[in-house]
Image: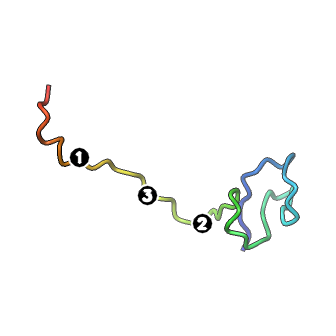
Amino acid sequence: MKAKCELDPDINKCPHFEPVEQECNSDNSCCGFYRIPSAESIPQYFRQPRWYEQYYKKR
């Protein structure tokens, strides 16, 4: 499976990197710049009210 490499092509020295297509041919998912374009995004954080906030006076 080909994945997108987000490291700039001019400084990328990875042996699995294709500079023309800017893709990675490796299955190295532990690389920090390795991104699969079809993967689902991480859900956004929604802040839950803290237990003590119910006692604050709203102004």
Point out the frontmost of discs 3 and 1: 1
Q: Secondary structure at mark 1?
A: loop
* Three-letter code, disc 3: Pro
| Near-viewer residue (46 or 53) | 53
Q: For this view, does 56 lie left or right of residue 3?
A: left
Q: Secondary structure at mark 2?
A: loop
Disc assigned to residue 38: 2
Image quarter (top left, top right, bottom left or bottom right) of the C terminus = top left
Residue 56, relative to residue 10: is it above or below?
above
**Does 11 appear above or below 58?**
below
Residue drawn at point x = 78 percent, y = 71 percent: 26
Q: Residue at x 88, y 55 (%)?
A: 13
Structural distance between the alpha carbons of marks 1 and 2: 33 Å
Label 2 with label 3: CB-CB less than 8 Å: no
User: Mark 3–mark 1 contact, CB under 8 Å?
Assistant: no
Give the labeled residue for mark 1: 49
Position above or below: 12 against 39? above
Residue 15, percent from left and from top: 88, 64
Neighbours of disc 3 within 10 Å: few (<14), some (14-19), many (20+): few
* For the residues bearing labels 1 and 2, Cβ distance under 8 angstroms: no
Res. 43 mark:
3
Residue at (78%, 65%) from the top-left corner?
24
| Few, some or many residues within 10 Å of mark 1 (<14, 14–19, 20+) | few
Please name which of the two marks, 1 or 2, marks the residue nearer to the observer: 1
Report, in whole angstroms, how far the alpha carbon at label 3 lies from the one at label 1: 18 Å
Res 22 quadrant in image: bottom right
**Closer-to-camera residue (12/1):** 12
Q: Is residue 54 left or right of residue 48?
A: left
